[in-house]
Amino acid sequence: MPGERKAFALRLDPALFNAIARLAGADLRSVNAEIEFLLREALRARGVKVDASKETGGNDR
């Protein structure tokens, strides 16, 4: 189903969460969307291709 998302618990160091929250605010994204953006960016940098059918139409710039 399009738009289906995998939910899971993620425990983060509070300082890391706060840094991501600041980035999210500056980029006008939710913390969840910012984490997903950062993960996609890191995967691209490592040459890992993410299936285009699973990508969202979010605020990825």
Image (spheres, rainbow, N blue to C red):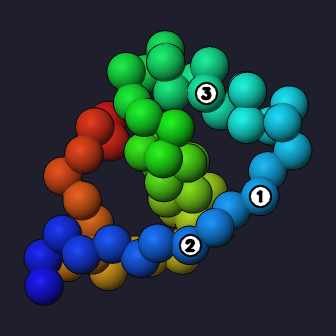
Q: How many residues crowd mark 3 within 10 Å: few (<14), some (14–19), many (20+)?
A: some
Q: Which residue is mark 3?
A: 21
Q: Is 21 above or below relative to 50?
A: above
Picture residue at 41% right of the left edge, 76% below the top = 6
Rendered location of residue 38, percent (x, y): 56, 48
Query: Comparing marks 3 and 2, which lies closer to the viewer?
Result: 2
Picture residue at 28% right of the left edge, 66% below the top = 55
Q: Earlier in the sequence, mark 3 or mark 1?
A: 1
**What's the amino acid at mark 2?**
Phe
Query: Comparing marks 3 and 1, which lies closer to the viewer?
Result: 1
Q: Is 47 above or below relative to 42?
A: below
Rendered location of residue 25, percent (x, y): 49, 18
In the image shown, does 55 or 21 lie closer to the viewer? 21
Element under disc 1: loop
Q: Quadrant of residue 52?
A: bottom left
- Asked if residue 41 can be seen in this view, the reply is no
Q: Earlier in the sequence, mark 3 or mark 2?
A: 2
Q: How many residues crowd mark 2 within 10 Å: few (<14), some (14–19), many (20+)?
A: few
Q: Is 37 above or below relative to 8?
A: above
Picture residue at 33% right of the left edge, 72% below the top = 5
Q: Which residue is mark 1?
A: 11
Marker disc for residue 8: 2
Element under disc 2: loop
Residue pushed farthest top? 26
Rendered location of residue 54, percent (x, y): 27, 75
Q: How many residues crowd mark 1 within 10 Å: few (<14), some (14–19), many (20+)?
A: few
In the image shown, does 60 or 25 lie closer to the viewer? 25
**What's the amino acid at mark 3?**
Ala
Element under disc 3: helix
